[in-house]
Amino acid sequence: MDSHYDQVMKAREQADANAPRRYFAYSTILDRAAFDEWKHQHSYGFFELPEGRLAEALDVDLVYDFPSRWWGGRVAGLTDVPGARVYGRLFEIPGKDWPIVQHKEGFVTSMCVERTVRVRVDGQEVEATAFVTNPRRASSDGPVSPRFVEALVRGAKSAGLPADYVEKLARGEAR
């Protein structure tokens, strides 16, 4: 358990259980094995990420804009790029569980912020929340983290993202 557990559990208690959130996940949370390990390390073994649906965020692209000591290099966020798209999965998260997702994504530590993205799923466009680098912490200093790219690719494969997109991730292609 880390120092944020009590904060997250308090937020969970105060959250509206009847207000689910649409969550567009495009990063390492898609690596189920790594996510399960994170849950165990942070005492969230009771939380299960739903299956989710294959989706693509529209008019955004990946950008390696957050230098992470833990990952040993820069990790990815999203940036606005007309016509571009980022694949991931769309999840419906119960309101009471949203603080756990916020913790995993780095919102609790101010590494990231929430933003709305347009997402195409099952032929329809909907709005969802994604997590992106906090602008105050964005930087292009240093190399991209090879470990992060490996986890991104593992997650993309396990999430069933398109093969050509997975190949793009493996090449480290991003802005």
Image: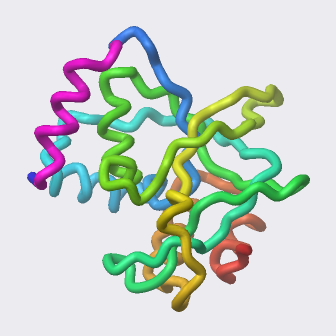
In the displayed structure, would residue 156 be above or below residue 142? Answer: above
Magenta: main secondary structure equals helix
Q: Residue at x 43, y 54 (%)?
A: 29
Q: Position of residue 57 (x, y in %)?
A: 72, 45
For the record, the magenta segment spans 2-16
Can you say which quadrant of the picture contains the C terminus? bottom right
The image quadrant that residue 15 belongs to is: top left
Count of marks placed on residues: 0
In front of the other: 14 or 21: 14
Q: Residue at x 66, y 72 (%)?
A: 169
Colour scheme in the image?
A: rainbow
In the displayed structure, would residue 136 be above or below residue 82? Answer: below
Lateral position of residue 85 relative to residue 114, left or right: right
Q: Position of residue 149 (x, y in %)?
A: 53, 76
Q: Residue at x 17, y 38 (%)?
A: 7
Q: Residue at x 59, y 42 (%)?
A: 115
In the displayed structure, would residue 106 be above or below residue 48? Answer: below
Q: Is residue 7 magenta?
A: yes
The image quadrant that residue 73 belongs to is: bottom left
Point out the residue furthest to the top here.
18
Q: Position of residue 90 (x, y in %)?
A: 59, 36
